Image: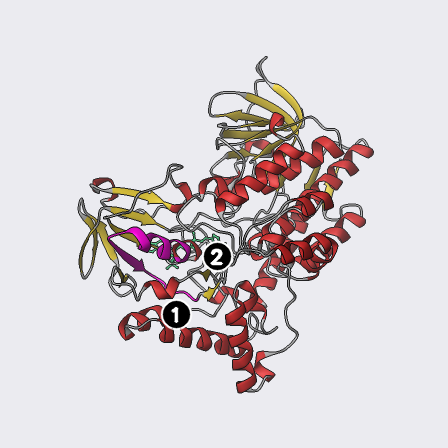
Amino acid sequence: MTSAPEAKSSQTRDLDALIVGAGFSGLYQLLCLRDRLGLSVQVLETAGGVGGTWYWNRYPGARCDSESHAYCYSFDEDLMREWQWSERYPQQPEIMRYLNHVVDRFDLKRDIRFNTRVASAHYDEAANRWHVRTEAGEEFSATFLITAVGCLSTANVPKIPGLESFAGDWYHTGQWPHDGVDFSGKRVGIVGTGSTGIQAIPVIAETAAHLTVFQRTANYSVPARNVPLTAEFRRWVRENTAEIRRTTRATPNGHPFLISERLARETPAGERQALYEAAWEKGGLQFRATFQDLLVDKEANDTAAAFIRGKIREIVKDPATAAKLADIDHPYAAKRPPIDTGYFESYNRGNVSLVDVRAAPIERITPEGIRTREGDYPLDIIVFATGFDAMNGPLLRMDIRGRNGVPLAEAWEAGPRNYLGLQVAGFPNLFTVTGPGSPSVLCNMPVAIEQHVEWITDCIAHLRARGLKRIEPKPEAVDRWVDQVNEAANATLLPLATHSWYLGANVPGKPRVFMPYAGGMVQYRAICADVAARGYEGFVLS
Ligand code: NA7
């Protein structure tokens, strides 16, 4: 397909770089390109403020599962020392305060345009520029286009027949009203038991008259053990910023703890049980790091799965409910493993009930509530904790067109294909921060983001220093990377969770391709550094 050259209006703003999104990645990318390289940069952001995913995910109980002292930028020691987190895991409002602090501290706001959604981004080969139009009709032209749109920003509202007829209110957790929702005295239904549902259920249950949980796939969860941070811990963080940074960079998932070298399979049963008990008491994603083989060896994984199932049966008093909750069909952590505060305990409340919609699927939504194959559930409010069209979803909803007018949606018809998760063949000078094919969601996000942003910054600096104008990957490098992403996933148990959003399986019709790079952040960082050191091997620079 050949498109006519873009007509450039006299109102077009010419830039060196245009960044889409003002979350963790867009903000740091702005700082790097503007303040370190001296480029003219504009950030466009749909929301009315910074925060990206966190701007929208304001649902009850919204909290990060990464520990706060590592869920932050590490590029500036002073910033790390001066910011004081209040709890082990940061709640949504605190993350927003942190990001706004970063924005003020580095004077970023003046180059961010809020309430501005990108409608299209088309590459003009003759001019070697990206022409970007907003929904309001503003036009920009830039040499480099950087998408910093996040992996979990396109809400997935299931197309259940009859939703428009519902007489009550319904909400998706990822598009939560800023003034909150009052559940008091209401009959509430929540669809979804992923990380979000598991965080929201205990909080909604506190005020709703009744909460009905519609569970399609039962899920593991480990207690978060959230606590306020002591003055002593905060001092330790201030004094050990370099060490914390080193740890997050030495481990595949970018968290501030290392994965044990012990193998579950080789540990005697009694000792193994004691280690799981200790990890359960400690809480958090660290449970996954109790043994090294949990994600690669099904028998090892079975021991963790059995332990958690045992805990579910211990906590949940009604045996029938416990059985439904423990009837989990995938290996532990093959889907993103949730952590919780009182999730399984919620089912012991008199006002919470569980409906198994795997056994009796939702048939439709009626004006009164949800109808499953087994009966009607009258509701005043429905909460969809049904996740996102993850990773490539936010990219595909923009009309991105590369060389010869080829839409990204066409180039990725059979699933995302790129090199290092960073660049797509046929889309020169387009960089995708935490794109599919990068570790992103399998890593503590700020750690992944800083690596991407710094790599992109160094790459652009490299081009400019040599008077080069264009970079794009060779198709054969893309082919190799797609194979590497598949091989990395297949070396783990992750593909065994066939309903997972890692595979795109949560969105009907989406190609089933394992999207994140599962080889770990340490290996990924080394690969990217090596590619750069070899003069950007696999890319064409011109
Ligand atoms: P997830 O992890 O995608 O979970 C979505 C949940 O919603 C999951 O239990 C789904 O069941 C369920 N779901 C989705 N569609 C339906 C329909 N049509 N009917 C019934 N149930 C449905 O999203 P989250 O927001 O919880 O978490 C996303 C990420 O945010 C998380 O992984 C962290 O990285 C932070 P399914 O499992 O598909 O059967």
Q: Quadrant of ligand 1?
A: bottom left
Q: Nearer the viewer, mark 1 or mark 2?
A: 1
Left or right, 454 with respect to 210, comes to right
Residue toward you, 37 or 468 = 37
Residue 218 within the segment the image draws in magenta: yes
Q: Which of marks 1 and 2 is nearer the N terminus?
A: 1
Q: Can residue 33 be seen in this view?
A: yes
Residue lying at 36% horizontally and 57% vertically, measured from the top left: 202
* Quadrant including the C terminus: top right
Q: State the extent of the magenta-drawn residues as a range.
A: 198-220
Where does the image place residue 169, in percent across and percent down from the top left? 26, 41
Number of the label disc, if any, that sits on residue 328: 1
Where does the image place residue 389, in percent across and percent down from the top left? 44, 47
Residue lying at 59% horizontally and 74% vertically, measured from the top left: 291
Where does the image place residue 168, in percent across and percent down from the top left? 22, 42
Q: How many marks?
A: 2
Find disc 2 in the rendering and name its residue. Answer: 503
Left or right, 178 with respect to 9, comes to left
Left or right, 460 with respect to 223, comes to right
State which quadrant residue 443 falls in.
bottom right
Q: Are marks 1 and 2 in contact (CB under 8 Å)?
A: no
Residue lying at 57% horizontally and 18% vertically, measured from the top left: 7
Q: Which amino acid does label 1 sit on?
A: Ile
Residue lying at 57% horizontally and 66% vertically, measured from the top left: 286
Q: Give me the C-alpha separation between circle 1 and circle 2.
A: 18 Å
Secondary element at image label 2: helix
Q: Which amino acid does label 2 sit on?
A: Leu
Secondary element at image label 1: loop
Mark 1, ligand 1, within 8 Å: the answer is no
**Does 102 sit above or below residue 263?**
above
Where does the image place residue 241, in percent across and percent down from the top left? 71, 53
Badge 2: residue crowd in 10 Å (few <14, some 14–19, many ≥20): many
